[in-house]
Image (cartoon, helix red, strand yellow):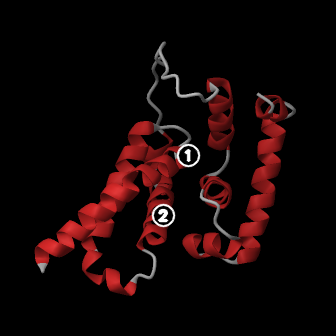
Amino acid sequence: MRTSRADEFLEFASARTGQLFRSACLLTSGDVHLAEDLTQETLGKMYALWGRVARIGNPAAYAQTVLVRTFLSHQRRRSATERPLGELPDHTPDDGTDPLLRIALLDALAALPPKDRAVVVLRYWEDRSVEETADALHTSSAAVRTRCTRALGKLRQRLGGSIGEFATR
């Protein structure tokens, strides 16, 4: 019985790690190392409660919720504002994405407060409903709508007309 739970978790973790990592990258505004740490911490928390997984209706959605809560608790720490300095690598992988768009969006996301960033990522990257986002953040639907409106306004202000230019490429 114990090995089947471990096997089930291993299968779950293998299937969800990529999605969790991508969400963590967006939450951390492209900080890959912090995203890896958040993903690992999320999977560790999920493993600890995996025996009670029968009570969790949707483990994948619950893992996303754990990721967002882990990110928000990390942002409350004093060390969360420290950023290492360094040069960007000269070589970027050619995966068909526009690096200028990616940098502009990550910079704009980084300028948002952590809770606003979490709302934008959950609503528009994860394509969650207002109610699902509210549940994940332990807040009301009205608060999610308000944060979303304000965050999108800040993104539009920060990106200006350049977002349309990027979208047509």
* Left or right of 106 in this view: 72: left
Q: Secondary structure at mark 1?
A: helix
Query: Residue 39, position in %: x, y?
Result: 38, 53
Above/below status of 82 relative to 13: above
Disc 2 crowd, CA 10 A, few/some/many (<14, 14-19, 20+):
many
Residue lying furthest bottom: 55
Residue assigned mark 2: 64
Residue lying furthest top: 90
Between marks 2 and 1, how big is the CA–CA gap?
13 Å
Q: Secondary structure at mark 2?
A: helix
Residue 154 visible at all: yes
Q: Amino acid at mark 1?
A: Leu
Disc number for residue 97: none
Q: Residue at x 51, y 59 (%)?
A: 72
Disc 1 crowd, CA 10 A, few/some/many (<14, 14-19, 20+):
many
Identify the image quadrant of the N terminus: bottom left
Q: Residue at x 65, y 34 (%)?
A: 107
Among numbered discs 2 and 1, the one appearing first in the sequence: 1
Q: Residue at x 82, y 28 (%)?
A: 165
Above/below status of 52 relative to 110: below
Query: Residue 49, position in %: x, y?
Result: 29, 76
Disc number for residue 26: 1
